[in-house]
Image (cartoon, rainbow, N blue to C red):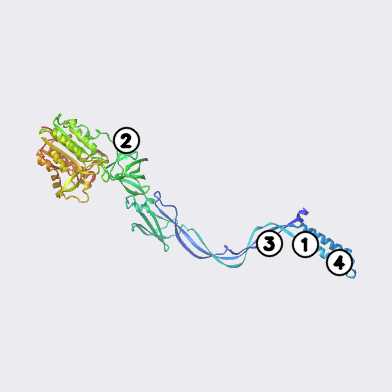
Amino acid sequence: MLSGFLGSCTSARWTVQEKQSVDHSESEIVRENYFLQQSGEINSGNPVLSLELFTKTEYEYPQRVLVQRTIQDYQLRWGSVALGIGGATMAFYLANATDFGHDTSTKRWTLNGMGALMLASGFLNMKAVGDPQPTGEERYLRSTGTTTEIDTMPANSSIDTTASVYMLYNDLIIFEDNNQQLSNGKLNIPVGDALEDLNLSGANPGSVTVEVLFADSLYQYEYPIESVLQPYAVVNDQLTALRSSANENDDNVLADLVEGSELKINNINDEWYQVLYGISETYIKKSSADIIWRSEDYTIEDQVAVPRVPFGNVDVESNIPVLNQQNNNAKALLVVNQNYEEPLNTRNFAFRDGRLIRSYLENALGYKEEDIHQLADIPDSDTLNTVLSSIQESANDSTEFFVYFSGYGTIETQNSANELQLLTVPSEAKTDSTISLRSIFSEIGKVSSAKTIVLSDIDFSASNQKGRTPENQQQKIMEYTVSPLTDAHPNSSILFGARLNNVSGLYMSQGVEKMHHIFPYFFARALQERRTTISDIYQYLERNVSYTSRKLYDRPQSPLLFGNTQLNIVSE
């Protein structure tokens, strides 16, 4: 232990750590500011901009010399010890063994002192081992200057303060609050609520800017609408198919959605919206719906789906009365266009209307199946003219001729006169085209018959929205269109289901799903009630078609009759 004690030792000392150390024990506040900082992200699930109140405080601190106490370990230098012992031994020997004459005492003391010094230096000449170890003791000495530091932290939530908030869309202020209170140190701005009130629509709704004026500072935030709100599809057709996959076929139709139904959009591709119906991912055509922007938690109230009902389950499709026995000299032509493409909407249930009319011709009026010619989605006039030529060849003066048209129509100027046209359904080989209704009525007039009855459920409203035809001219245009028939055949009647500015609507609403257009439905209903004269049928249509259209859609739909009003649809 002695050798260990003699072989090593430790010492403590104070050393300068930093000449301009900041003394945080003393401070003076120079200035203090409040500011706002966004917390969290804004999205369709949380369409609220949250700003948190922070303080920014500038402190002044003194700078001083910082000293630190450390401990250093030392070990003997054995070479120095040996030299010291050797030198001391020689000095002691000389001092005590030599006769120095008359000055013996002084020289002896001198040599002994030198020996002691040499011995001490041998032991004291130690070497430092390792680095100095800090003890954790520090001291600030003299001042060397000052410095400033800034501290940022959430403000006291109890601070009572307000901010001015503005929200702009397309440079228009849509929300303004000049005294919005901060609650618990936070300012919550309901961006989604303000935008939802605008009922924004379209695929590219733009962006919204939020401006906050607080403590003489202006904060600006800009967000795309699609990052704040969720797109919803609003059905713009009277009826559109809800499908299980993004393609058109009869097997993937789940139900039909009525106009105004809303569905949340999950995804968008070139032709389809992927939408949520309940929890199921379904599809509707993009052309059948518009986009409207809602918040994520928007509750859908307007959603009416109509299941596909087999033919025969609607009231006018069953219990068809027998009004006439088999009529061997009756012929019919049914032209039904349903599957139009953009910009026109599909005429939903037009084929079902055609089947309804055919059922009444066969079962109520006794027409033979082979004498009923039905054309669907005609691309041009060729097939129609071929069928009319065949009927003209086989008809005679005793023939009863019945014609039914369904589709879209337009008004075109021909030879300085407005003429009605039937819009065809384009095919791969044929582009969009029209067929002159005046020419069709001219061909119908060439069919020899005892009586000719024409039902027209052609909708002209889509092409007549920009330049609405005045009421006093509508009848003249329609009368001019049918005149080749009425002039050639006094025993002819033409019933239009709607005037030129009227929409030919579907008889469908929540709780009342008739699966037919209003006009053919009530025509069948009139026959079901055994109304057979044209005047009686027309009066029935006038009352019910117009009333039903206004009840369901709050818009007019007025039938119009030309020709002989005294004809009886049943053989006499």
Does 286 sit left or right of 317 as displayed? Answer: right
Of circles 3 and 4, which is in front? 4
Determine the residue located farthest toward the bottom in the rendered image.
Answer: 102
Q: What number of labels is visible?
A: 4
Q: Nearer the viewer, mark 1 or mark 3?
A: 1
- Reading the image, the residue beneath label 3 is 13
Q: CA distance from mark 2 to mark 1?
A: 109 Å
Classify 10 Å Cα crowding around label 2: few (below 14), some (14-19), many (20 and above). Answer: few
Instruction: Give the mark nearer the N terminus: 1 vs 3.
Output: 3
Q: Indicate which disc, 4 or 2, sits on the residue closer to the N terminus.
A: 4
Q: Amino acid at mark 1?
A: Ser
Image side of residue 188 versus residue 26, left or right: left
Considering depth in this image, is 435 or 149 the residue closer to the camera? Answer: 435
- Residue 333, image x and y in percent? 18, 36
| Residue for badge 1 | 121
Work out whether mark 2 precedes mark 1 in sequence or the reverse, and give the earlier one.
1
The quarter of the rendered structure image containing the C terminus is: top left
Could you say whether the residue bearing mark 3 is in a helix, strand or loop?
strand
